């Protein structure tokens, strides 16, 4: 079976994808610098799958360290998750974000070119649809962004397209995720952010276990059914399965494909909150705060292309996502 390098493989989506790859019979090599993940995630991946794999503690900004991975392993394709991902922090520290996410990707591409590995699945984001495209988002819409984090995704997509233009041997899959939540059904791995969470679900989880006093709901006056923002939430296990499909695709096809990974259905902040309350069996306190600048009223995917190109579609509904999130946080109230 092919060997897949997973950058950022100890992170939330990375760890679930590693499980998926190992269970499908792939060999994996994981690279992570633990900037927003923990070494324990790697032990949990091994526990779930009963399989071992090589690991490199490595920062993609260190070109020699990245080359060492390719020199010591025969890598057939790369899934590239590694990168900073907090929108607010990217606005406060744009240079840090541009340097880490873009330069790190350039170092990875340089090493791939040197070792003749020309197949990559890139962890992009629905944020590349920017503020003006109408929902549902379709892959051929123009891309833009509203913050430096989003622009790093837009730019890396462009860099990978340009790499393909310069060398048509490349195979590139640009996966535009919507809002990943949930956790592995074992309860062993899940979303475990360092510090105060930026995303809705981990925040709700920390309120549920008493670590945070109440949930802040940013805006209840949007033009949506209940006034709160609507997003396309997708179970992280569905997302991991989408990466498996993307890897199979890049191993067999050349070219560049941007593909949405979402459910195609939107859920509001209150939908998620009430679903989680059902899962944990108690009401959770919340306070409505002003809208955050740059937040859109509604964001969800058109998922036709994923079905057509990958034969993939999301299986899990919102109640399953929140039940699995609660199962993880209940078993790991202090994280991994």
Image (cartoon, rainbow, N blue to C red):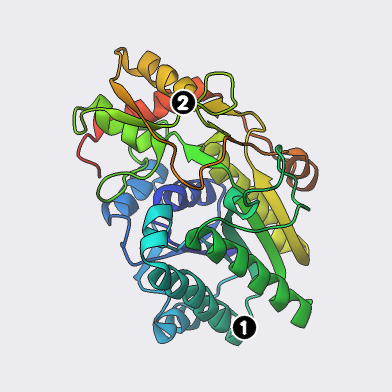
In the picture provided, is 322 more to the left or to the right than 157? left
| Circle 1 SS class | helix
For marks 1 and 2, give the CA distance.
49 Å
User: What residue sits right under mark 1 in the picture?
Assistant: 113
Say which quarter of the image contains residue 54. bottom left
Comparing marks 1 and 2, which lies closer to the viewer? 2
User: What residue sits right under mark 2 in the picture?
Assistant: 220
Query: Which dot marks residue 133?
Result: none
In the picture provided, is 234 more to the left or to the right than 8? right
Q: Quadrant of the C terminus?
A: top left
Q: Looking at the image, can residue 167 be seen?
A: no
Instruction: State whether residue 122 is above or below residue 276.
Output: below
Residue drawn 74% across the image and 57% down it: 142
Nearer to me, 99 or 244: 99
Instruction: State whether residue 145 is above or below residue 335.
Output: below
Look at the numbered discs 1 and 2 and tell me whether their residues touch, using CB distance below 8 Å: no
Residue drawn 55% across the image and 51% down it: 25
């Amino acid at each position: 079976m092919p060997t897949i390098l997973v950058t950022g493989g100890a992170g939330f989506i990375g760890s679930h994808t590693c499980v998926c790859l190992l269970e499908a019979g792939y060999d994996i090599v994981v690279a992570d610098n633990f900037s927003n993940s923990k070494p324990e995630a790697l032990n949990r991946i091994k526990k779930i799958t009963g399989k071992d794999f090589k690991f490199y503690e490595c920062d993609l900004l260190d070109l020699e360290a990245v080359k060492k991975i390719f020199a010591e392993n025969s890598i057939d394709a790369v899934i590239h998750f590694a990168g900073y991902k907090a929108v607010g922090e990217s606005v406060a520290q744009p240079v840090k974000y541009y340097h880490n996410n873009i330069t790190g990707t350039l170092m990875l591409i340089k090493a791939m070119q040197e070792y003749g590995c020309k197949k990559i699945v890139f962890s992009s984001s629905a944020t590349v649809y920017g503020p003006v495209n109408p929902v549902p988002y379709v892959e051929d819409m123009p891309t833009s962004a509203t913050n430096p984090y989003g622009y790093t995704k837009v730019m890396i997509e462009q860099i990978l397209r340009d790499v393909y233009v310069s060398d048509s041997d490349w195979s590139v899959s640009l996966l535009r995720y919507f809002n990943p939540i949930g956790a592995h059904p074992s309860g062993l791995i899940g979303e475990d952010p360092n510090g105060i969470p930026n995303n809705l679900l981990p925040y709700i989880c920390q309120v549920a276990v008493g670590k945070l006093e109440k949930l802040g709901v940013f805006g209840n006056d949007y033009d949506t059914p209940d006034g709160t923002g609507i997003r396309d939430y997708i179970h992280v296990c569905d997302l991991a399965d989408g990466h498996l499909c993307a890897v199979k695709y890049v191993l067999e096809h050349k070219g560049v494909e941007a593909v949405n990974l979402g459910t195609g259905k939107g859920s509001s902040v209150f939908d998620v909150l009430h679903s989680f309350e059902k899962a944990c069996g108690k009401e959770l306190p919340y306070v409505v705060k002003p809208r955050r600048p740059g937040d859109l009223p509604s964001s969800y995917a058109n998922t036709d292309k994923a079905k057509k190109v990958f034969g993939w579609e999301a299986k899990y509904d919102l109640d399953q996502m929140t039940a699995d999130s609660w199962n993880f946080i209940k078993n790991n109230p202090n994280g991994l």
